[in-house]
Image (spheres, rainbow, N blue to C red):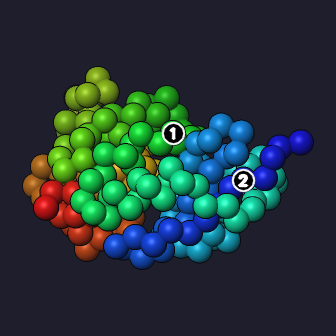
């Protein structure tokens, strides 16, 4: 039988962030600016069936505290786990390699993963990312400007500004 997931809510400059970890791997499996109950409902059935307990994680708290102070480097040091195609996994890994305080374009990420014409695939992978800000898709921008973001353009802009001040 699978151990219950660990979940908690953390204050960020962008609102309360719900973070769910797999106790067995220690990886973040979901993070959302929505309540934990909604984040749990979005889990794959095998994970959701384990249930969850309210248990803050010191590593997550430290990473988010540093991020609130402008240093997002610890965000990508925490392990994440989410289902996706091989290409999505490669894109998410490339996104996690973007240093805090920097951005990369969808086209640059596409080049990084060996798909020079794959900017739309990068955008699609970012839109399916379920571990923001630990997979910091807010650092991926369009060549012509900000680009989209599931949390909204204002939050994306503020996240980038937080890391570049």
> For the residue labelled by badge 1, is the local secondary structure a helix, a strand or a loop?
loop
The residue under the point 71% across, 39% down is: 24
- Placement of the C terminus among the 4 image quadrants: bottom left
Q: Position of residue 43 (x, y in %)?
A: 67, 55
Q: Position of residue 4 (x, y in %)?
A: 78, 52
Can residue 140 be seen? no
Q: Distance between the residues labelled 1 and 2?
A: 15 Å
Can you identify the residue that label 1 sits on?
79
Can residue 46 be seen? yes
The residue under the point 83% across, 43% down is: 2
Q: Is residue 143 above or below residue 161?
A: above
Residue 1 horizontal side relative to residue 80, left or right: right
Q: Quick one: which residue is furthest to the top in this view?
A: 114
Residue sitting nearer the eye, 17 or 61: 61
Q: Quick one: which residue is furthest to the right in this view?
A: 1
Q: Position of residue 38 (x, y in %)?
A: 63, 70
Can you identify the residue that label 2 sits on?
5
- Placement of the N terminus among the 4 image quadrants: top right
Residue sitting nearer the eye, 2 or 70: 70
């Amino acid at each position: 039988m699978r151990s219950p997931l660990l979940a908690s809510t953390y204050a960020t400059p962008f609102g309360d962030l719900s973070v769910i970890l797999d106790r067995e791997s220690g990886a973040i499996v979901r993070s959302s600016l929505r309540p934990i109950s909604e984040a749990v409902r979005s889990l794959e059935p095998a994970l959701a069936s384990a249930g969850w307990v309210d248990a803050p994680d010191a590593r997550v708290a430290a990473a988010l505290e540093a991020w609130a102070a402008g240093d997002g480097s610890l965000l990508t040091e925490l392990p994440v786990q989410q289902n996706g195609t091989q290409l999505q996994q490669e894109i998410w890994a490339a996104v996690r390699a973007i240093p805090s305080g920097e951005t990369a374009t969808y086209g640059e990420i596409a080049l990084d993963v060996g798909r020079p014409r794959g900017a739309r695939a990068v955008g699609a992978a970012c839109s399916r990312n379920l571990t923001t800000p630990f997979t910091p898709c807010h650092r991926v921008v369009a060549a012509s400007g900000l680009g989209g973001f599931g949390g909204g353009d204002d939050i994306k802009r503020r996240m980038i500004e937080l890391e570049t001040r």
